[in-house]
Every structure is written in structure tokens, then in C-alpha cells.
Amino acid sequence: VPALCNALNDHRIPVRREAARALGRLDEMSAVPDLIMALDDPDPSVQSGCVTALTQMNAAQAASRIKKMIDTPSRQVSGHSVHAVAALLKEESIPFLEALISSHPQTYVRCEALLALTRLAPQPGYSAAIACLSQTDKPVLISACKRLGKLENPSAIPALEKLIGTNPPASVRLAAQSAINTIQLAAD
């Protein structure tokens, strides 16, 4: 473990990335402080490896630091960070995820937060997905439709039909109709 922690400072990116991954697999809590420090690595693949390792280790003490990684320019790192916060904080992350869904400036983050919330807590996830149907970002609308289909709650059908009635882009209509079909098949 000490050698792997030292490797987090190696000048070679692949060495740092693989050291983070190995530490996650070893699940040695003494490595948590080093992994948290390595979140500042300039390479997104190393940052992502550290987020994944800390999540594998269930290092809840890293959650506040990982929350800050959500606003990083790397989509990979921000996406992993959203899911890590949900995994590490469990139900405590619900208000945070709801806030991301409703107000984060990055569409990608809103979609990842919706995915994480519906997996973590179906009822709050359902409510958030229904609320997303009033947004204008096409990726968010599609994500909300997909999540509603996965949740298979028949009470979502009127909201999905209403969305189709507003004549959104074809990809959104297709996602909404697909969700309706999935829900109806599950109810049969």
C-alpha cells in the first residue's frame, strides 16, 4: 500500500492512474488520505481513478471533496463524482442530487444526477423525472423519459403524453413514447 500511495505522485500518468485503481481494489483505508490528495491530479483519468477507488472503499469521509469534483471540466470525472456522492452518502445525498437536477448549469451533470437519484431512491427520482419534463434541454428530457420508463410507474403516462402533445423534437417524442410503451408492457 505505501508503494502504491507513492506511485500516485509518479511523473507518468498511467502509473498514477493504475495505482489509484489498485488501491481501490485493495480496499485499504490507510490509503484514503493519499487518494483524496490525488484528486487534485491534473489528469482527468487519474482523478476519475481516485474517485472510483474512494467509492469502492466506501470512504464516506471523501464525499465532500468529491462533491467539488462535479464541477470539473471533464465529463468523465464529473459523472463519476455524481455517482460517487450517491454511493457514499446514500439517502443523505438525495437533496444534493435533487438540487443538481434542478439547477446545475451543465446538462450532462443534470442527466447523471437524475440517473443516480432514480437508482438510489425511486420515489424522489420519479418526482424529479416528472419535474424534468418541463425543462427545455433535449438531453434532460430524453433522460427523464428513459428514467420514467425504467421506473415503470403508470402514473407517469399522462405527463409523458402531455410532453408528446407539446410537439418536442422527434428524439424526445420517441423517448416519451418508448417510456409509455415500457410502462404499459410492465402493467400487463
Image: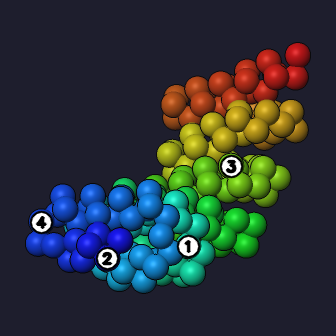
Amino acid type at image mark 4: Arg
Residue 138 appears anywhere in the view: yes
- Pick whichever, 143 or 30, lies toward us: 30
Read off the residue under disc 2.
Answer: 2
State yes or no: discs 4 and 3 in contact (Cβ < 8 Å).
no
Residue 22 percent coordinates (x, y): 35, 59
Q: Nearer the viewer, mark 4 or mark 3?
A: 4
How many numbered circles are shown?
A: 4
Label 2: state its secondary structure.
helix
Residue 158 percent coordinates (x, y): 83, 36
The mark that comes first in sequence, 1 or 2, is: 2
The quadrant in which the N terminus is found is: bottom left
Read off the residue under disc 3.
Answer: 119
Between the C-alphas of marks 2 and 3, the distance is: 35 Å
Read off the residue under disc 1.
Answer: 59
Quarter of the image for residue 95 reads bottom right
The quadrant in which the C terminus is found is: top right
Label 4: state its secondary structure.
loop
- Pick whichever, 117 or 169, lies toward us: 117
Q: Nearer the viewer, mark 1 or mark 2?
A: 2
